[in-house]
Structures are given as structure tokens and as C-alpha cells.
Amino acid sequence: MVTGSRGIDRQTARAMFEQHLSPFVSQGRTWLLGTARGIDQWAMEWLLENSETCWAVVPYTRFKLPQWVQASLDEMDRIVELQLPKRKTASAIRNRHMVDL
């Protein structure tokens, strides 16, 4: 599972992935990802470039997400749509679900 700050730029995130995640690629892992801007979007991009298996876990349905994330979702191996009610706690519930998977 990858989680983190929304306020991180692409170059910094990619450098962190190279340093911390690259030893774990090509080992048959399934990566669980949120769909927020920042670390989530850069992780999606980097992991897909490395041909990793990626699941997106979304609090609502994929079609209630912003347009910018739709193309990345098309490349995911699986999209888990929790179909939660629209409220402030939905992302926290999604994160808990990701941990429990």
C-alpha cells in the first residue's frame, strides 16, 4: 500500500520511489493505491511504468472521481469501488479498508 502527502511534487516523489520502492518491484506484488492528487497519482504512474500489478481503491465509484484520474484507472488491474456515502470520512474509511485487504 502506498499512502502519503498530497503536497509532493512529481520529481521528489519519483526519487523517493526509486530509493524506497524499487527493491520491491518485479516480485509479484499487488500494490493498493488511493486516487488522490500527490503521492497517490505519482505512485500510480511510477508503478504502472514498472509494469506492477496495481489496484485502485476508491471511496465512491470511479465515475465520481475527477477527470484527471480516469486515464490512470483504465490502466489499473482492478478497481475496488466501495460506494460509500459522500462525506468527509469516506477517505479515512477507504484507507482502513486498504489496510484490511
Image: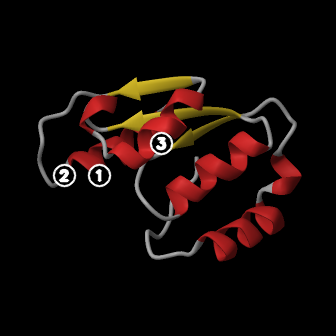
**Figure check: 3 above or below 99:** below
Badge 3 density bin: few <14, some 14–19, many ≥20, Cα 10 Å: few
Q: Position of residue 34 (x, y in %)?
A: 45, 46
Q: Residue at x 50, y 37 (%)?
A: 71
Residue at 52% in and 54% down: 41
- Left or right: 75, with 60 as reference point: right
Q: Mark 3 highlights which residue? A: 99
Above or below for 80 versus 85: above
Q: Is residue 96 above or below residue 63?
A: below
Q: Which residue is mark 1?
A: 92
Which corner quadrant of the image does residue 50 belong to?
A: top right
In three-dimensional space, the C-alpha distance between marks 2 and 1, rounded to whole angstroms, equals 5 Å
Q: Secondary structure at mark 1?
A: helix
Name the residue type under label 1.
Ala
Q: Nearer the viewer, residue 45 or 81?
A: 45
Residue type at numbered disc 3: Val
Q: Which residue is mark 2?
A: 89
Instruction: Tell which circle, 3 or 2, labels the residue nearer the N-terminal end.
Output: 2
